[in-house]
Image (tube, grey):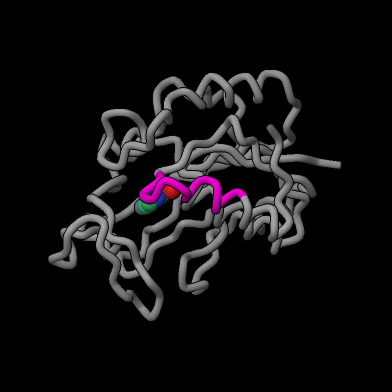
Amino acid sequence: MKKALIIVDVQNDFCEGGALAVPGSSEIIPYINLLMEENAYDQVVLTQDWHPAGHKSFASSNGRQVGESIILNGVPQFMWPDHCIQGTFGAEFHKDLNRDKVTHIVQKGKNIEIDSYSGFQDNNHFMKTGLDDFLKYHDIQLVEIVGLALDYCVKFTAQDAVANGYVTCLHFNGTRAVNVKPDNARDAIYEMIEKGVTVLG
Ligand code: VGL
Ligand code: ZN
């Protein structure tokens, strides 16, 4: 059975000092590096949040405050600080993440009008990223997921992995949450379990 590791959005803007810093984010990097050393993954995929300047998920693009919510193309959209703008330092992968075994990179959030939390598709379910095609082409049946942030991109990527037919495991020690509200991490875990994700300690 072939297995892949999917490393979600381990980028400077989501790490300490970044525009959308996730608490404790840099702690997961040694854990992820160890996973890659100790497991013979058939594929290692990075996802990269990759927004054009002026992206509609940014509060500044809508004359809003960070933390507000708007309806964007019919779905609720949290208003984020400007982050992961194409070609900037904030959009680059964290330098400590070992990329020697990476076989594929998926960029998402490129459509200025639509956000994309999942590594598989945008939030409007309008465009696929090609990740499912890549994994199917390489006969992957099991995916293990780590990265940032647990309550957004990791959760939606894991749920879509189940929906696309993969045995899907989340490494709890390899992820951290934004926790806009204190219970967001816990709620995300329960939602993932309900949808069929296996949570590993
Ligand atoms: C993410 C908020 C906005 C994430 C990306 O990677 O979880 N969160 N864009
Ligand atoms: Zn984003």
**Residue 50 falls within the magenta-colored stretch:** no
- The picture places residue 147, in percent across and down from the top left corner, at 52, 38
Relative to 107, is 163 on the left or the right? right
Query: Measuring 32% from the left and 54% from the top, which residue is drawn there?
Result: 51
Asked whether residue 162 is in view, the answer is: yes
Give 165 or 180, whichever is nearer the viewer: 180
Q: Is residue 79 above or below residue 174?
A: below
In this rendering, the answer to whether 162 lies above or below 154 is: below
- Quadrant holding the C terminus: top right
Q: In this view, which residue lies farthest toward the right?
A: 1
Residue at the farthest bottom position? 74
Q: Count the marks.
A: 0
Q: Residue at x 55, y 57 (%)?
A: 156
- Where is residue 197? Give x, y as percent: 70, 51
Q: Magenta stretch: give its range.
A: 179-189
Would you say 199 lies left or right of 62 here? right
Q: Quadrant of residue 136?
A: bottom right
Place residue 1 in its image quadrant: top right
Q: Is residue 96 left or right of residue 128?
A: left
Q: Image quarter for residue 57?
A: bottom left
Q: Residue at x 79, y 49 (%)?
A: 141
Q: State the image coordinates of residue 86 (x, y, percent, origin top left).
A: 30, 47
| Residue 105 % position (x, y) | 52, 43
On whether residue 187 falls in the magenta region, the answer is yes
Q: Pick out the residue farthest to the left.
A: 63
- From where the camera sits, is residue 49 visible? no
- Please determine whether, in this image, residue 42 is positioned above or below residue 153: above
- As drawn, the residue found furthest toward the front would be 183
Task: Tell me if 175 is positioned left or right of 90 in this view.
Answer: right
